[in-house]
Image (cartoon, rainbow, N blue to C red):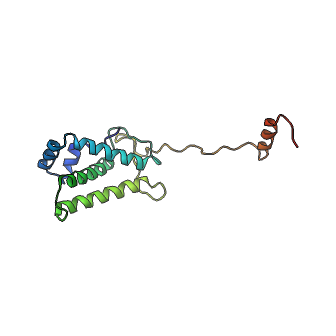
Amino acid sequence: MSCYATLQDVMDLGILLQEDVDWLEQRYPGIVERTATKVSGGIDGRLAKRYGVPFVAPYDDGLVDATAAIVAYRLLVKRGARPDGAKVAAAERAHDAAQAWVTEAANSKDGLVELVRTQSTPRGATAIDKGAPMAYSEASPYEWMDRQVERLGGRCG
């Protein structure tokens, strides 16, 4: 299981206060790590068609930020923040932007996001490793008929 965001990454966003996290951890021990693991798994599922997942640490900064924003929003909702509050609105905007970023990273045709395998990967190298031939072709367009004749024991007709 991958976990792309730590508690510190979530706290760095400034959406959750330390008191919120303390309350959640006291009431639901391990909630931050479990939520981050679930969100990371969802992101892996979304990116699996384009990238070799799970990614290897150290993770791409964009991936960490997107994961942390989604986790922070879920934790804020779990905490029971007022839906009409400014904090929830800011968290929701960050959540929606993170979801859009993941969608764009998964879009191989029109997406502008290109993730690297690790943060220390050289520029120009990407995490895409799904490029292999997906078809098989015989040498001749009539080769399949010869194969059928061989399977029938040399009898034709």
Q: Residue sitting at 37 percent across and 38 percent down?
A: 56
Give the answer, above or below, for where 100 lies relative to 130: below
State the image coordinates of residue 136 (x, y, percent, origin top left).
66, 43
**Image quadrant containing the N terminus:** top left
The quarter of the picture where residue 25 lies is top left
Left or right: 41 in relation to 19: right
State the image coordinates of residue 28 (x, y, percent, origin top left).
19, 43
State the image coordinates of residue 53 (x, y, percent, origin top left).
42, 42
The residue most toward the right is: 157
Q: Residue sitting at 44 percent across and 42 percent down?
A: 52
**Image quadrant containing the C terminus:** top right
Q: Is residue 17 visible?
A: yes
The residue most toward the bottom is: 84
Q: Tell me how many marks there are.
A: 0
The quarter of the picture where residue 91 lies is bottom left
Left or right: 121 in relation to 74: right
Which of the pair 17/149 is nearer the observer? 149
The quarter of the picture where residue 146 lies is top right
Left or right: 61 in relation to 136: left
The residue most toward the left is: 19
The residue most toward the top is: 153
Q: Is residue 60 visible?
A: no
State the image coordinates of residue 90 (x, y, percent, origin top left).
21, 61
Which of the pair 41/58 is nearer the observer? 41
